[in-house]
Amino acid sequence: MENNLMELWSLLSVTAPGLFASPTAFTDYFRKPIESGSAPERLATLRRRIKPVMLRRTKQQVAVDLPPKQEQAMVLDLSSKHRKIYDTRLARERQKVLGLLGDWEKNRFQVFRSLSMLRQLSLHAALVDSSHNAVNSAKVDYLAEQLPALVDEGHSSLVFSQFTGFLDIVRAHLEAAGIPYSYLDGSMTAKQRDAAIRRFTSGVTQVFLISLKAGGFGLNLTEADYCFVCDPWWNPAAEAQAVDRAHRIGQQRPVNVYRLVSADTIEERVVRLQDRKRALFDAVVDDGEMFGSALNAEDIREMLA
């Protein structure tokens, strides 16, 4: 369950037909009051209703010998030039998006296009305008410092981003430094994918650059003991799945996870949104699955405030 509470209703409509009358009734009586925080008693009622039909076993319960996982958010300041570019574009996009929110359903695609652009701009200015290629990126500088040091110390790292353009920039820095790496994105064939994985798992490379959507599921990469999540995703479950490529049964070393966040950008708002949604839906299943509830117009306004 990754997107919203209606996924819970869909599952229960199959596994426990009749538990809830209809999706409309579930939305009106449970989803809306719970998500707005206006009726805590509805949350308690929902938990009582689903308890007899929900059995959950966490990784911590079934893999008691799994080494610890340390997670840390690294909040990085944009360079002065990067900051000026970001703030200028933010002012323009904020005005445009707030105007589009009056008809949220009709303008959803345009809104998300603007948000995606701001998220890319938080990573590197050149992702939005190639003429800014010489503008320093705090995240690229951080990775360019950390990855070679970790390789020298015998560690292996996974680097996740949703934007392949950003991974391409990191690739160029690794090549300039003479550091071998593996690379995986959704455009690769099965043969190319398998070859990239083998190079990493066999120790030929100690850095694996992975597109979050391509590598978030189905990979066993316990050779890695460091993970860098370069940009926050709307849905925290997607990030957790990516990190669990390394932190899973078979891992022999503690896993260190660094989430890179650009200070005073839309990324900080996305992280706050993640935290709020995570807390809400964890409460529904008693510290259970993470739901990255679908964005609504009010969420967008908050991120652009």
Image (cartoon, rainbow, N blue to C red):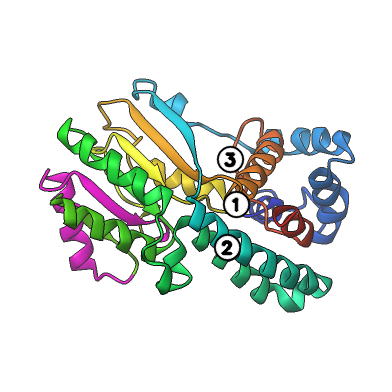
Specify few, some or many for label 1: CA neighbours under 10 Å numbering under 14, 14-19, or 20 or more. many
Residue at 32%, 25% in the rendered image: 254
- Given the image, on which type of amino acid does mark 3 rest? Glu
- Establish if 291 lies above or below 56: below
Which residue is identified by label 1? 265
Near-viewer residue (194 or 173): 173
**Residue 264 as seen in the image, left or right of residue 148:** right
Point out residue 33 in the picture as x, y percentages from the top left corner. 86, 46
Identify the secondary structure beneath mark 3: loop
**Residue 56 as seen in the image, left or right of residue 92:** left
* Residue 65 located within the stretch drawn in magenta: no
**Which region is colored magenta?**
187-213
- Given the image, on which type of amino acid does mark 1 rest? Thr
Residue at 80%, 37% in the rendered image: 43
Separation of marks 2 and 1 at Cα, in angstroms? 8 Å
Identify the secondary structure beneath mark 2: helix
Specify few, some or many for label 3: CA neighbours under 10 Å numbering under 14, 14-19, or 20 or more. some
Which residue is identified by label 3? 289
Specify few, some or many for label 2: CA neighbours under 10 Å numbering under 14, 14-19, or 20 or more. many
When asked about the image quadrant of residue 221, the answer is top left
Which residue is identified by label 2? 118
